[in-house]
């Protein structure tokens, strides 16, 4: 079974309070971004043990702790799974706020569920995903939602951005999620996120913000520079995604490549939502 774990963008992100478990309560609207890794799971050849091989971008950390491996182990603890042969091709940058690792984990759960006919319904997969990371649960349903609590509880949110021309710029800076959260002071949101996103997109610039931007820009001024360049190139709305460092711009139409030159070491995704 071959699947293509896609990334996500955050439209607005308010970090609202510190939780007794040490995590933060937040609110954000998550939308799928079709920038994808590839993950394959097959039954292992006769006599072979479970394995996970890699290609594409290097992933920090031990292979045994990779979220795809952890997804397999989580299900293997509850179900009699045969040994599996897995492969992950990594294309979505890591530490980018695009949820790439979380998507791999959620898509691995879905693929293992199908490949080995576990017949787990989406609600069950979502609760397994929650155990692997706050962002993981979103990728089970993988459609626009209003997220709250740890970012793992959802309300439907009717926002159709399909076809919107989008540029995502990763300035080659790995920002750890835990470090990013430690720099944010939780607060009551200044604007109602859902009401703000119900306004026409040009109004979002004034009312739809990401609390990580304010906290991280003094430390990483490049984030503000990328955002300013996206607005200068004609973006209707631009923002940091999640805890960064990727910054995205939503455009009426994509600027020609020569209009936006990025330094070596940056990775840019151009496409439509
Ligand atoms: C920034 C976002 O990408 C927004 O969508 C997510 O909140 C990040 O979710 P994630 O990468 O799945 O994060 P996790 O792997 O669950 O947690 C990593 C670390 O981030 C912090 N963390 C994460 C989520 C949350 N609601 N509050 C937190 O304080 C914790 O310090 C935690 O140890
Ligand atoms: N399949 C995977 N892909 C990426 N990172 C993984 C994966 N499995 C485990 N990890 C670990 O997770 C860390 C990346 O998590 P981190 O939360 O910083 O970034 P992210 O996956 O890009 O998304 P986000 O910042 O939105 O949560 C890596 O440093 C790596 O050690």
Image (cartoon, rainbow, N blue to C red):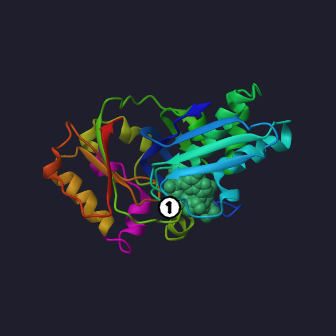
Look at the image and say whether residue 268 sits in the magenta stretch: no
Q: Residue 25: tell me if it is visible.
A: no
**3, above or below 257, in the image:** above
**Which residue is disc 1 drawn over?**
187
Q: Nearer the viewer, residue 206 or 263?
A: 263
Residue furthest toward the bottom? 219
Q: Describe residue 10's horizontal placement relative to residue 169 as left or right.
A: right
**27, above or below 178, in the image:** above
Please tell me which residue is depicted at 65% across the width and 33% down the height of the picture: 111
Please tell me which residue is depicted at 75% across the width and 24% down the height of the picture: 119
**21, above or below 233, in the image:** below
Query: Regarding mark 1 in the picture, which secondary structure is present there?
Result: loop
Q: Whole-percent x and y of residue 199?
A: 31, 36
If the picture is divided into quarters, which one holds ligand 1? bottom right
Q: On the rendered image, what quadrant is the N terminus found in?
A: top right
Q: How many marks?
A: 1
Q: Whole-percent x and y of residue 18?
A: 61, 62
**147, above or below 170, in the image:** above
Q: Nearer the viewer, residue 255 or 48?
A: 48
Q: Whole-percent x and y of residue 237?
A: 27, 46
Which residues fall within the magenta stretch? 204-221
Please tell me which residue is depicted at 28% across the width and 35% down the height of the picture: 200
Q: Nearer the viewer, residue 219 or 78?
A: 78
Q: On the rendered image, what quadrant is the C terminus found in?
A: top left
Q: Residue 34: tell me if it is visible.
A: yes
Residue furthest toward the front? 46
| Ligand 1 under 8 Å from disc 1 Cβ | no
Look at the image and say whether residue 212 sits in the magenta stretch: yes
Q: Residues within 10 Å of mark 1 (few under 14, many from 20)?
A: few
């Amino acid at each position: 079974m071959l699947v293509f774990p896609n990334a996500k963008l955050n439209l607005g992100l308010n970090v609202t309070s510190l939780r007794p478990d040490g995590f933060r309560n937040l609110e954000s609207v998550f939308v799928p971004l079709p920038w994808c890794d590839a993950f394959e799971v097959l039954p292992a050849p006769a006599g072979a043990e479970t394995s996970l091989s890699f290609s594409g971008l290097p992933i920090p950390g031990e292979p045994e702790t990779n979220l795809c491996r952890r997804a397999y182990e989580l299900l293997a603890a509850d179900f009699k799974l045969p040994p599996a042969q897995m492969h992950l091709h990594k294309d979505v940058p890591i530490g980018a706020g695009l949820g790439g690792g979380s998507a791999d984990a959620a898509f691995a759960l879905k693929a293992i569920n199908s490949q080995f006919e576990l017949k787990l319904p989406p609600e069950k997969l979502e609760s397994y995903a929650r155990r692997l990371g706050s962002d993981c649960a979103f990728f089970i349903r993988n459609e626009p939602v209003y997220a709250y609590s740890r970012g793992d509880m959802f309300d439907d949110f009717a926002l159709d951005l399909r076809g919107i021309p989008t540029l995502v710029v990763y300035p080659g800076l790995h920002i750890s999620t835990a470090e990013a959260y430690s720099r944010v002071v939780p607060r009551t949101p200044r604007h109602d996120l859902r009401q703000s996103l119900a306004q026409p997109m040009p109004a979002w610039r004034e009312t739809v913000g990401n609390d990580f931007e304010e906290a991280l820009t003094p430390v990483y001024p490049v984030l503000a520079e990328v955002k300013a360049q996206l607005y200068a190139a004609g973006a209707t709305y631009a923002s940091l995604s999640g805890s960064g460092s990727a910054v995205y711009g939503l455009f009426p139409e994509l600027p020609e490549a020569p209009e936006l030159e990025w330094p070596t070491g940056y990775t840019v995704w151009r496409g439509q939502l």
